[in-house]
Image (spheres, rainbow, N blue to C red):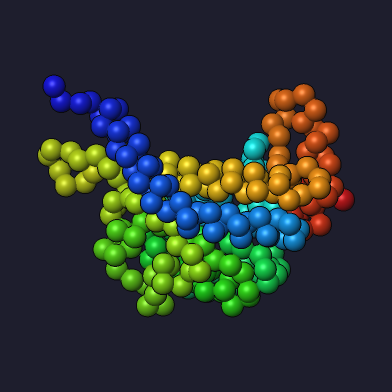
Amino acid sequence: MDKNGIQRYFEKIQLLTNQVVLDQNDLLLTISSCMVNTVQQHKRIFLFGTGHSHMMVEEGFYRAGGLTAVVPIFSAALMLHENPIMSGKLERTPGLAAPLLEFHQPQPGEMIFVYSNSGVNQLPVEMALLAKEKGLTVIAVLSKKYAAKAPTNAIGKKLYEVADFVIDNGGEPGDALISLKEQPWQVAPSSTVVNAIIWNALVAETALQLEKTMDEEVPVLASLNMPGAAEHNEKLFLSWKDVNPYLGYGD
């Protein structure tokens, strides 16, 4: 009996996740060590992505169970809720990385995760190059198979060629996993699911390592629906709002 779409997708995601995490365990441990050092120095971990990749910025920021050191680099024009066609054009437009990054006055020793599944769009590559110039450690999260097949940009570089560390999410060119019989295009993308697993695995390891080395509580946000969470979070906000403006109250 043929497996239905639910079963086929779930099995492919399981296999892909196992492959991505287990094959890159040493790399992920190295990156989490960088994250530990960044948090210990009271510095920031920036997240950036355009189009659907911006969802990883949302996943990492102001999240129950997430790190207060995470700072999003947001622009509504690069998301999809206002004008997806314009967003697609802007992520291929040169010159936009500088105002987005410089707004946050990044400092040497900080980190940035740049999400771009194809790894070829102009803006993510430009962001990675600029961040390196400013002394940030750059982590690219992409599909190497997709990047190998996609055409390059005006810069002439792909994201995996300019980052300090490259995490491969193992996705297929075009992202989707399930083939259709009557047309060449596939359905059911993998990047969001796998990228979220990678990110939260890194957060878990970072927090566990911080717990071993910090004299104070690990700076992890709690769900406001848990007893004592509001007081815990407010304490963290006061401690971190000097470097993470999104945690302040406007004072």
**Residue shown at 20%/26% (left/top)?**
3
Q: Nearer the viewer, residue 210 or 49?
A: 210
Q: Residue furthest top?
A: 1
Q: Nearer the viewer, residue 79 or 193?
A: 193
Residue 243 in sight here: yes
The image shows residue 209 at horizontal and vertical percentages of 65, 48
The image shows residue 242 at horizontal and vertical percentages of 81, 57
**Residue shown at 44%/57% (left/top)?**
167
Compared to residue 116, the image places residue 176 above or below, namely: above
Q: Is residue 178 left or right of residue 106?
A: left
The image shows residue 199 at horizontal and vertical percentages of 52, 47
The image shows residue 243 at horizontal and vertical percentages of 77, 58
The number of numbered discs placed on residues in the rendered structure image is: 0
**Residue shown at 72%/25% (left/top)?**
226
Compared to residue 30, the image places residue 107 above or below, namely: below
Q: Is residue 172 left or right of residue 80?
A: left
Query: Which quarter of the rendering shows the N terminus?
Result: top left
Residue 248 in sight here: no
The quadrant holding residue 234 is: top right
**Residue shown at 58%/54% (left/top)?**
32
Q: Residue furthest right?
A: 251
Q: Is residue 83 left or right of residue 170?
A: right
Q: Is residue 172 left or right of residue 82?
A: left
